[in-house]
Amino acid sequence: MKIAVLDASTLGKDLNIAPLSVAGDVTAYDTTAPEQVKERTRGVDVVVINKVKLNGETLGEDPTVRLICIAATGYDNIDLNYCRAHGIGVANAAG
């Protein structure tokens, strides 16, 4: 499984993402601009974000992403209708 963390620098310096490697091959980017999302999510199964916006424009017409994990409590940066239509699961931080 391929996992991409798109905005690791926004997660805090004390957060260790190394345990994600148990689930798959992890690539972490400090930041990701909107025009970089398609390239960085191509061939990726799971995307971990905090502030990056994900929608049809940024993910593309034929996304390989199957799960978006948001390291925050809200969903306002995710197009949930797009995700439902493309079979992409979305989970955020509890509480």
Image (cartoon, rainbow, N blue to C red):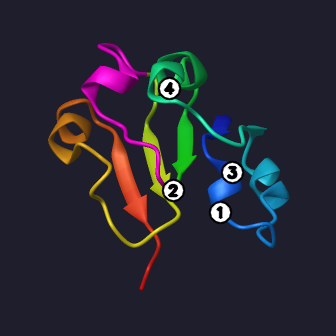
Query: In the image, is residue 55 above or below residue 91?
Result: above
The quarter holding residue 73 reads bottom left
Categorize mark 2 by other alpha carbons within 10 Å: few (<14), some (14-19), many (20+): many
Of the 4 image quadrants, the one containing the N terminus is top right
Labels 3 and 4: the sequence-earlier one: 3
Residue at 51% across, 56% down: 50
Residue 74's x, y, as percent?
Answer: 33, 67
Does the magenta portion include 58? yes
Q: Compute the Cα span from label 2 to label 4.
A: 13 Å
* Crowd tier of the residue under label 4, counting other residues whose Cα lies within 10 Å: few below 14, some 14–19, many 20 or above: some
- Along the horizontal axis of the image, is 34 left or right of 15? left
Sequence-wise, the earlier of marks 2 and 4 is 4
* Residue 81 drawn in magenta: no
Per the image, the residue denoted by label 2 is 50
Q: Residues within 10 Å of mark 1 (few under 14, many from 20)?
A: some
Give the mark nearer the N terminus: 3 vs 2.
3
The Cα–Cα distance between marks 1 and 4, rounded to whole angstroms, is 18 Å
Q: Which residues are magenta?
A: 50-63
Residue nearest the viewer, comparing 92 with 66: 92
- The disc at residue 89 is none
- Marks 3/1 in contact by CB < 8 Å: the verdict is yes
What residue would you read off at disc 3? Answer: 8
Residue type at mark 3: give it. Ala
Q: Secondary structure at mark 4?
A: helix
